[in-house]
Amino acid sequence: MVPPSPLSIPGQRRPRRGLLTRLRIALVRVLGCLVLLLIGGMVLQWVVTRIDRYRYPPAGELIDVGGYHLHLLCLGTGTPTVVLEAGGGDSLEMWARVQPTLAKTTRVCSYDRAGLGWSERGLFPRTLAAMTHELHTLLHTAQVPAPYVLVGHSFGGYIAQSYTHMYPDQVAGLVLVDSAMEDLPLRAPAYQVVSSPPPIVYTVGQGLVLTGIGRIITPLFPEASDKLPPDARAAAKAWAQDLAVVTTSIEEAQQRPAIEQEMRQSRRSFGNLPLVVLAHDPAFVLPATIPADMQAVFREVEPIMQQLQQDIARQSAQGTYRVVPGSGHYIQHTARC
């Protein structure tokens, strides 16, 4: 005869689980919830990205430059053509205050570098030579007539200078808007430390965007968008949470040391070319979102920054250096138009 199961005996209780077993079950449940939340965040991120692409259609034309398309926006008529080159990771929306104003007097073109804004990812690594070649191909294919006045902001200053050296016959003038300076990391090692985060920071940033968490906890750096017209501001903030755009921005940032070396190797005089170097106001109050230790480093290297900007202006016999009162790094936003 088979003995009755202890569980079938009236009054017999099921054995209690041990503490370790209960902890394991709780941990599995928590991990399961986290996985579901992450999957939900990824789906939401994908959906919202598609909605953003619908809400903010390309303002200009998508030009085939040989296997991929670059987004080009041209306004106004006249010569010479002004070509606007945005800063690192920035889309053409960053010129939204400036371009319509300049278009009242001449033709003005802005564009998204490969992988940024509405432009598709390019076929070449993010080297200075490749980005300069892409701009040249874009202008030639779109039949934008030379001569050009190149305007480069921040990282875009490298490309504007490189283009001037590679195609001098096409450039009538050069304007550098708080341009990046290839010698700054050498002259100010402290700045190099705070401006070059370890790779894990980029990985975490991509993860936050991929899972949609970035839309909640990482708003776009205020100075880079809050002075823009409403539509441009909304589009710029949307690009800041687009995984493809963020990935390209990271690639540009990681290539920066190599690009700075390219700049040093190709550096030479601009001869008699009209050159205007615009620098931010040294008294500009940095946003409170920047940690205090980083603000201290920026203040420490401020004289070096201004000196290097003056050095750039001296590379042309017609070079001019100007500090724009009340402006921050995004001079085109904080200065009066």
Image: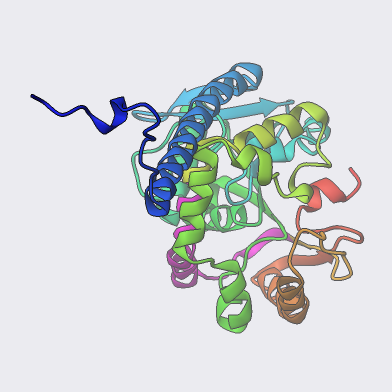
- At x 48%, y 66%, the residue is 198
Does 320 sit left or right of 245 as displayed? right
Q: Is residue 115 visible?
A: no
Magenta: main secondary structure equals helix
Which of 290/91 is in front?
A: 290
Residue 125 in the image, given as x and y percentages of width and height: 36, 49
Q: Is residue 84 above or below residue 152?
A: above
Q: Is residue 39 above or below residue 196?
A: above
Q: What quarter of the picture does the C terminus occupy? A: top right
Which of 123/139 is in front?
A: 123
| Scheme of colours in the image | rainbow
Q: What quarter of the picture does the N terminus occupy? A: top left
Q: Is residue 118 above or below residue 160?
A: above
Q: Residue furthest front?
A: 1
Q: Is residue 291 visible?
A: yes
- At x 65%, y 57%, the residue is 154
Residue 96 in the image, given as x and y percentages of width and height: 76, 34
- At x 34%, y 39%, the residue is 123
Residue 169 in the image, given as x and y percentages of width and height: 53, 49
Span highlighted in magenta in the image:
248-276
The image quadrant that residue 284 belongs to is bottom right
Residue 137 in the image, given as x and y percentages of width and height: 44, 37
Does 68 sit left or right of 275 as displayed? left
